[in-house]
Image: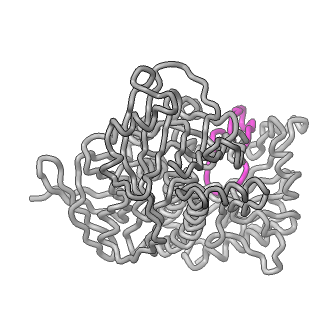
Amino acid sequence: MMKQEMVDVAIVGYGPVAKLLAAVLGQKGWNVGVYERFSEAYPLPRAVHLDDEVARMLQSILPKSEIERILQPVPDLYEWRNAERELLLALDFSQEGISGWPGHLFFNQPELEKVMDAACRNLPAVNVNMGNEAIELKEYEDHVELTVKDLEGQVRTIHAKYVVGCDGANSFVRKNMDTTITDLGFAADWLVVDIVTKEEREWNPMNLQLCDPARPTTVVSGGPGKRRWEFMALPGETKEDLNNEDVAWRLLEPWNINPSNAVLERHAVYTFKALWADEWQKGRLILAGDSAHLTPPFMGQGMCSGLRDSMNLAWKLDLILSGKAADSILETYTQERKPHNREVVEAALFLGTVICVTDPQEAKKRDEVFFTGGVPEFPEFPFLTSGFLYQSKDGKNNKYTGKLSFQGQVEYRGKTGLFDDVVGRGWSILSPVNDAKKVLSQEQMEFLEVIGAKFIEISEPADGGKEGLSDIAVDVDGKYKQYFNETGLQAVVVRPDFYIFGGAESLTDLPLLIEDLSNQFEPFKIPSLS
């Protein structure tokens, strides 16, 4: 007889997207079963870049010191040069991001996954099952039955309230879901080569995009002590032509990389694609990461996009599992994440059209455009445009809706550190105004309590004497003051995934925001509103 397990959420696959989702849900005490068909973690690097938003997500499951140990900030520019090594473009990658971390960071994926795995296994509510392949899915009105087979061939069934497919481009969960695919028809083969240096070496620039029609090439950090090259397959070259060790060393030779000063960690040919599933959730089946979308790597946003899925999904599943929202709230998952991801994919494709030019005449024309200053404007990084967002009819107070919220250092209840670490996470209303909640009605305060929102007054250090109050966070380095001054906001309502639901330029507008948030929850049957 088959054994049965009961979980709140079953996750198929165990890459970074699954690890983040499992850890965030596990922290809330929800029983999470993870089922990964491979018995060991994938030992080689894949993604190498993440941004400040993703670093903040990792901060929700890992100690700051651990993140700093495995991430390498970029001290300078990301340079784009042509075949003659003339500068086409220099992007400043050294800037601080809004999320309390450097805007761009490089890392070694196995190292990152190792610490994320430890975070999952340290949570009693998370049960990681390696060497367990998903073989069957049956969806019922109130649960899903997921059948898995272990390496000994033993089969068992898991009863889950929801199943999330974090199982990559060939997703088993997606194949069991009724969804179509939008494919933008982009496909490019690139040889990806990772090395470990045997000696200290200065890299100048640290990150380079070589737009050389003879062989478009990307050279970036692979995390501390590591380096990555990506070589585009030329017209007529096959995957087989490229994918061998001798070719990797031959292509590395002009960069003064050879077996005497480097270890070849791996070489693999990837076909970069641009596509997405049209529905990321149907009933109790959900997709996240590569199972929902594939992004060309020209913006370094493939893994980042998947981790955004996890953060979006986690707070909605938490509301459902705690009985505070109907499962129809999951409709907002595709609604919010798909347009955002589509813009990331389209921006990456735009960069790809600049990089992947193999015709020398076309490359010359492109270079000339850069030199004469006629470069088309690079796409702005997308923000959320639909879903749980405040949109006033008069267009007022909409400027910061859907953008990322600010995180800085604060002192709170005797502890000093990044806001999330010392104040906590979840819905929050931040204001530099003393006792801003006085403008809200009792009913609005009760609604905020139901969704677990915190009201935090951001105070200047000079305001001393208030530090003991539970809802006051002291702005230790003046960055919050700068943020509120620059935005002109008097209050900001922040979602659990760090996006701004809405900002109020005048405190008198805050009740309108909270009323709108309450109304947006109405269709999803929050008990206190029904």
Picture residue at 87% right of the left edge, 53% below the top:
486
Q: Position of residue 200 (x, y in %)?
A: 54, 19
Which is nearer the eye, 308 or 197? Answer: 197
Of residues 97 and 419, which is closer to you in this image?
A: 97
Give the quadrant of residue 149: bottom left
Total numbered labels: 0
Q: Residue at x 59, y 50 (%)?
A: 211
Residue 181 visible in the snapshot? yes
Q: Is residue 168 magenta?
A: no
Q: Nearer the viewer, residue 523 or 323?
A: 523
The type of colouring in the image is one colour
* Range covered by the magenta-colored residues: 405-428
* Residue 187: quarter of image: bottom left
- Displayed quadrant of residue 399: bottom right
Question: Where's the C terminus, which quadrant?
Answer: bottom right
Question: Given the current orientation, which residue lies at the most extreme right position?
Answer: 462
Task: Give x and y (percent) for residue 526.
Answer: 56, 72
Quadrant position of the N terminus in the picture: bottom left
Q: Is residue 286 left or right of residue 509?
A: left
Q: Nearer the viewer, residue 384 or 234?
A: 234
User: Does residue 115 appear in this view?
Assistant: no
Residue at the (37%, 37%) spot, across then down: 266
Q: Residue at x 46, y 32 (%)?
A: 253
Q: Is residue 413 magenta?
A: yes
Where is 34 relative to 145, above or below? above
Q: Is residue 97 toward the left or the right of residue 220 in the image?
A: right
